[in-house]
Image (spheres, helix red, strand yellow):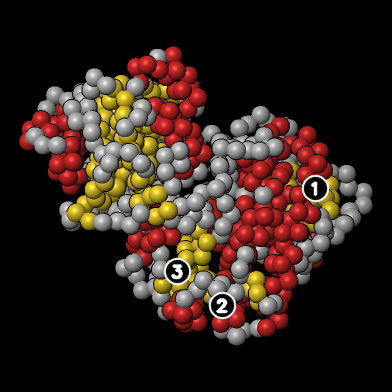
């Protein structure tokens, strides 16, 4: 979603801003822009619809104009107003330029107010009101940019972050962090703001993570931060060693494929230091956290998208394996219903980025509810979710660039199962269960490798889907959420309408969709539910559905032509959700590729969804 970079330096910053934009591309966006204060204290601004490379090309034609030491850049994912040049950021008000993430909820009334002072609007965005408001306030009451931003801030409502420059005062950059993530990069003779550490890797590996309500002014040699009470405060500098360069695809054409194939290693990373003496054990848990886990009687999970689907899988595990009742909520729904908190409930948030706005709203709302504690399962160590939750479990999947989650999904499941093993150990529930989980986890990376070997065969199925507009995935038990996740993958990468159903539920309505052209993909591991699933397959077969069975056992249907049985390697029962999603990810990838879709950046989607 939208990405911010703002840099102040003693050198020319054009290339730094542009490389920052490149590193923000993975978040998803539809236009980009840049504004630099040149050496004559004039604002130079350029915006383009489409990829950053379009902006770069336009800038390189007049590179000498964009020389300066202070500037902003932005990737925009449209919320207010369609993706056009005029709606792209930065937005200007004479000598003021602003870039912004999130939403200004009272932008309509501010626009109305500013119009009475003859301000003219060139865009449909909520952002433009920030620029004009700052200009208006400065003209009215004077003051430096930081003084004006402090006065204007209480007039803006919403969850957002913004970075502002003033061509009349080119030696400072000012930012406000109101719920949307913003960091400061601390360099040598240069400092910067960004919505993501990755954007600043060419400048520094030292960061300050701003907190909700912070306002900050940076110069090339100084950093000042005021908290939400207006008090000048110190925030720690965190040194990060980010080794993985997200812009490198290696031998792969797309990050999506790279990340699918990284899963064995990613799972090994999740399990590192967590497999010991035949136990799966979360050694990072403090005594206090362990006490909370021992006292937990109910689990409430909250997540969005693929993270929600992994939460759904874990509900079966929490109930079946450690006897804990469990609810799962979509974050945007959890926030707006009167949740009844069960006694001794542990609240678990699942998020790859840890910056998803719906998740952060749910976390902040839950602080007033009577949960034992909040626990975050997250892939991003310094994310807002990780920082604001009481207990943290990191998935260590490594940076995920492709919008469609793959390795973060399987590592979330691995982390969830590790948590369940840890709880069973603490509660002394069942030693055999501990051993089973240990053995399954230990061999899981190898099982996934075996699944990946099927890639050429799965690729050969793709021609069957070239004229397909719809697809159905079905499963039972833990494989039901995997059917939903498989359908989500196919939607994201190929724009084919797909749904995942509980196999037993088809006959209650959706069976009406089945005909000779409807592909039905069946997840059929060799478990206690297989017999029931076979009856469901018969129901589809009787309606002439086009059947694809992914199973360990060869399920033979004589005299039926509209069927393919894709035989999968053996997998321990407990890890079938992690293993069976892999061929589904491959199927989605190859179908997307066949349809010539940019599978890393599907249309309309963003990797990090920072608006509610
Ligand atoms: C949630 C999510 C992802 C999805 C896409 C958009 O993100 O729905 O599952 O793949 O990237 O956001 P998160 O909270 O897990 O970061």
- Residue 153: image quadrant is top left
Residue at figure coordinates x 23%, y 48% from the top left: 224
Q: Are marks 1 and 3 in contact (CB under 8 Å)?
A: no
* Residue 286 visible, this orientation: yes
- Residue 388: image quadrant is bottom left
Residue at figure coordinates x 67%, y 49% from the top left: 262
- Secondary structure, mark 3, is strand
- Secondary structure, mark 2, is helix
Residue situated furthest bottom in the rendering:
428
- Give the labeled residue for mark 1: 454
Q: Residues within 10 Å of mark 1 (few under 14, many from 20)?
A: some
Q: Nearer the viewer, residue 61 or 110?
A: 61
Up-down: is 368 above or below 580?
A: below
Give the x, y percent position of residue 472.
68, 47
Q: In terms of sequence position, does the residue under pointer 1 or pointer 3 come before the other?
A: 3
User: On the rendered structure, is 188 left or right of 547?
Assistant: left
User: On the rendered structure, is 90 left or right of 584?
Assistant: left
Give the CA separation, mark 1 to mark 3. 38 Å
- Give the labeled residue for mark 2: 423
- Secondary structure, mark 1, is loop
Residue at figure coordinates x 47%, y 76% from the top left: 286
Tell me the quadrant of the picture where the N terminus can be found: top left
Residue situated furthest right in the rendering:
559
Give the x, y percent position of residue 541.
81, 50
Q: In terms of sequence position, does the residue under pointer 2 or pointer 1 come before the other?
A: 2
Residue situated furthest left in the rendering:
141
Disc 2 residue: CB within 8 Å of ligand 1: no
Residue at figure coordinates x 58%, y 64% from the top left: 415
Give the CA separation, mark 2 to mark 1. 35 Å
* Residue 513 visible, this orientation: no
- Give the labeled residue for mark 3: 391
């Amino acid at each position: 979603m939208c990405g911010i970079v703002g840099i102040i330096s003693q050198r020319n910053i054009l290339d730094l801003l542009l490389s920052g934009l490149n590193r923000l591309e993975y978040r998803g966006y539809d236009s980009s822009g840049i504004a630099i204060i040149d050496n004559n204290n004039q604002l130079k601004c350029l915006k383009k619809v489409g990829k950053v490379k379009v902006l770069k090309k336009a800038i390189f034609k007049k590179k000498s104009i964009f020389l300066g030491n202070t500037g902003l850049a932005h990737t925009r994912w449209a919320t207010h107003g369609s993706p056009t040049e005029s709606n792209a950021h930065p937005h200007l008000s004479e000598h003021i330029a602003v870039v912004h993430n999130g939403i200004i909820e009272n932008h309509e009334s501010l626009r109305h107010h500013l119009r009475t002072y003859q301000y003219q609007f060139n865009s449909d965005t909520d952002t433009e009101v920030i620029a004009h408001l700052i200009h208006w306030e400065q003209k009215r009451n004077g003051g430096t940019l930081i003084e004006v931003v402090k006065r204007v801030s209480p007039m803006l409502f919403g969850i957002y972050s913004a970075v502002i420059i003033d061509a009349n005062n080119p030696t400072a950059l000012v930012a406000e962090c109101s719920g949307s993530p913003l960091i400061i990069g601390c360099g040598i003779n240069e400092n910067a703001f960004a919505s993501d550490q990755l954007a600043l890797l060419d400048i520094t590996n030292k960061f300050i993570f701003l907190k909700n309500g912070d306002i900050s002014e940076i110069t090339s040699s100084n950093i000042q931060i005021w908290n939400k009470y207006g008090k000048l405060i110190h925030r720690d500098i965190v040194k990060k060693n980010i080794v993985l360069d997200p812009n490198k695809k290696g031998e792969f054409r797309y990050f999506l494929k790279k990340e699918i194939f990284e899963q064995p290693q990613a799972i090994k990373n999740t399990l590192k230091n967590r497999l010991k003496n035949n136990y799966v054990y979360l050694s990072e848990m403090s005594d206090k956290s362990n006490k909370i886990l021992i006292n937990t009687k109910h689990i409430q999970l909250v997540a969005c998208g693929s993270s929600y689907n992994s939460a759904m899988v874990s509900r079966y595990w929490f109930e079946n394996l450690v006897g804990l009742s469990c609810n799962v909520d979509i974050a945007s729904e959890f926030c707006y219903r009167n949740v009844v908190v069960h006694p001794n409930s542990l609240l678990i948030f699942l998020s790859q980025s840890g910056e998803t706005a719906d998740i952060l709203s749910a976390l902040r709302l839950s602080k007033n509810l009577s949960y034992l504690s909040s626990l975050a399962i997250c892939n991003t160590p310094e994310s807002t979710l990780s920082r604001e939750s009481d207990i943290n479990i990191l998935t260590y999947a490594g940076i995920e660039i492709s919008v469609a989650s793959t390795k973060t999904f399987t590592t979330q499941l691995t982390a969830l199962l590790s948590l369940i093993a840890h709880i069973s150990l603490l509660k002394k529930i069942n030693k055999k269960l501990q051993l089973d989980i240990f053995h399954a986890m230990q061999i899981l990376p190898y099982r996934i490798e075996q699944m990946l070997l099927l890639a050429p065969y799965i690729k050969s199925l793709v021609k069957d889907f070239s004229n397909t507009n719809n697809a159905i995935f079905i499963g039972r038990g833990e494989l039901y959420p995997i059917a939903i996740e498989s359908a989500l993958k196919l939607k994201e990468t190929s724009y084919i309408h797909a749904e995942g159903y509980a196999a037993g539920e088809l006959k209650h309505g959706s069976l009406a969709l089945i005909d000779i052209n409807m592909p039905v993909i069946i997840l059929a591991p060799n478990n206690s539910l297989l017999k029931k699933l076979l009856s469901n397959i018969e129901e589809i077969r009787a309606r002439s559905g086009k059947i694809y069975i992914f199973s360990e056992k060869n399920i033979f249907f004589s005299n039926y032509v509209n069927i393919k049985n894709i035989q999968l390697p053996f997998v321990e029962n407990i890890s079938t959700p992690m293993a069976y999603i892999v061929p589904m990810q491959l199927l989605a990838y190859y179908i997307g590729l066949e349809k010539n879709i940019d599978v890393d950046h599907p249309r309309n989607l963003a990797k990090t969804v920072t608006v509610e």
